[in-house]
Image (tube, rainbow, N blue to C red):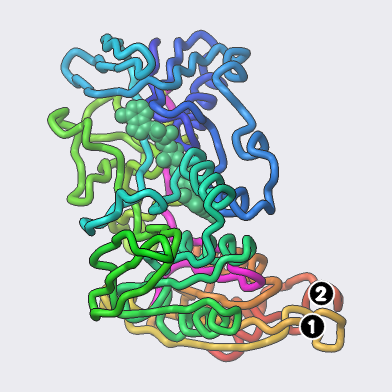
Amino acid sequence: MRYIVIGAVAGGMTAAMKIRRNDDKAEIVVYDRDTDISYSGCSLAYYISGVIKDRKSIVPRDAEYFKKFNVDVKTNHEVLKVDTKTKSVVVKDLLTGVSFEDRFDRLIIATGARAVLPPVKGVNLDGVFVLRNVKDADRIKEYIEVKKPEKALIVGGGYIGLEMAEAFSALGLKVLIVEKQDNILPNLDSDMARLVEEYLLQKGIEIKKGTSVVEIRESAGFNKEAVLSDGTKVLCDIVLISVGVKPNTEFLKDSGIQLLQNGAIKVDEYMRTNIEGIFAAGDCAAVYFKLNGRTMYVPLGSTANKMGRIAGENATGGSLKFNGILATSIFRVFDLTVAQTGYTEKMAEQDGIEYEVGHITKPHITQAFPGAEKMTIKALCELSSRKIIGAQIVGTKGVDKRIDVLATAIYSGLTADDLFQLDLAYAPPFSSAKDPIHYVGMVMS
Ligand code: FAD
């Protein structure tokens, strides 16, 4: 059996290695147009800031490494076309410029996504960046080292924009975030997003909301001037555009593989596309929201790894089902951790769900213990079933543990009353006799 995998990062390499574990005779070829493979995209902001110093630690493996598993990874090879009838792909060797055909019995598409560049004049100027892969990070690092910018403009106040606000600040730059929506972090409810915003203002980050960048141009003195839709002009000398991502699926346009309107590949719970023998995984594909079964596009590394394993398993004849996502996510900005899982109020309203909201603000460990820090949890509980359906947390310590308990509770269909009953571990350095999770159950009982 000959397997071709397109894309050699989280989704693609997980799939390739699962195929190898399941079938030691399989021929496995992985094509990637990049030179860096199997890297940690999630670490890029920390690599730029210098928290992670060694480039090799975020790109720990190369094509050579996979040879010992008899997986043939071909970097600098772009797949230009998939022919589902002849079960073949057209591949271009980017170093020689030569194109060739390769045939497959099973194909796994894991081409990920790329950063969206808005149709704004000046986005291609020197000093204007996106952050998606290791080369983007190298370019930003080099620009900062050589040009020594003093003021950064971040276009887009999502989690990547905020991680980069921390990175730029750590490197001594002043930061302005411009967010088109009325709140930064538009995927959070506005009351929780405001907590993050207040914290960022205290940290000296400037934020302009409800306006967007309409033009970036060169300026005397400072490097650049950005014109905003409200007419304001801001001066800066490095720009990061972080306004979202788009699936890399243009090369599938005429292949017959079904795509959603945003270009994401439509897959079923087994990561199968509409064409037999062709699977997709990771940021190039859509996923199901566990709580309503609806298709969503939530490009995350955590999900890409899971989808890759499922695609690899099922491409080798298995029947592993993906139970869907809760869109659980977490990130840090300075000392603040922001996490969410399941429904937000906005999403619940769109689905016509009647819900109750509970808020608590409690220390993450026993108040008297040194280092206790408060966190705010907002949880949603469905009125009819009393099930917990969503949670968002903002705090400095212990947020990761509580969001994972809440994600597990939602996954398992626990009610607000169950949260109070959970037998959670307690000693003063770790939690409080009544953990914040218990308080959530109590305020909603
Ligand atoms: P990708 O990583 O996009 O890899 C796809 C590969 O396919 C690329 O190497 C590309 O070159 C290749 N390719 C594309 N088209 C072709 C073609 N036609 N032919 C050949 N090769 C092709 N997720 C989290 O869960 N937690 C986090 O904390 C987090 N932080 C992040 C921080 C940053 C700054 C960024 C940028 C992302 C972060 N993510 C995070 C998201 C995570 O990195 C992605 O979800 C993950 O990388 C997706 O993996 P993938 O394999 O699906 O796609």
Position of the N terminus by quadrant: top left
In the picture provided, is 196 more to the left or to the right than 34?
Answer: right
**Residue closest to the eye, 316 or 112:** 112
| Secondary structure of residue under mark 1 | loop
In the depicted view, which residue is nearer to us: 327 or 410?
Answer: 327
- Can residue 248 be seen in the rendering of this structure? yes
Residue type, mark 2 in image: Tyr
In the image, 196: left or right of 241?
right
Position of residue 331 measured from the top left corner of the image (x, y, whole percent): 56, 63
In this rendering, the answer to whether 351 lies above or below 376 is: above
- Evaluate if marks 1 and 2 touch, with contact meaning CB atoms under 8 Å apart: yes
- Would you identify the image quadrant in which residue 365 lies? bottom right
Query: Compared with residue 90, is residue 161 higher up or lower down, i.e. above or below?
Result: below
Ligand 1 within 8 angstroms of badge 2 C-beta? no
In depth, the one of 426 and 169 nearer the eye is: 169
* Magenta residues (range): 316-344
* 154 over 251 or under it: above or below: below
What residue is at 33 percent from the left and 50 percent from the top? Answer: 125
Q: Amino acid at mark 1?
A: Ala
Q: Residue at x 33, y 83 (%)?
A: 354
Q: Is residue 28 above or below residue 7?
A: above
**Percent position of residue 234, x then y:** 36, 73
**Residue on which the image places disc 2:** 426
Q: Position of residue 340 (x, y in %)?
A: 50, 69
Within 10 angstroms of label 2, few (less than 14), some, or many (20 or more) residues? some
**Residue beneath label 1, please?**
433
Q: Position of residue 59 (x, y in %)?
A: 60, 34
Q: Nearer the viewer, residue 189 or 436?
A: 189
Answer whether residue 225 is magenta in the image.
Answer: no
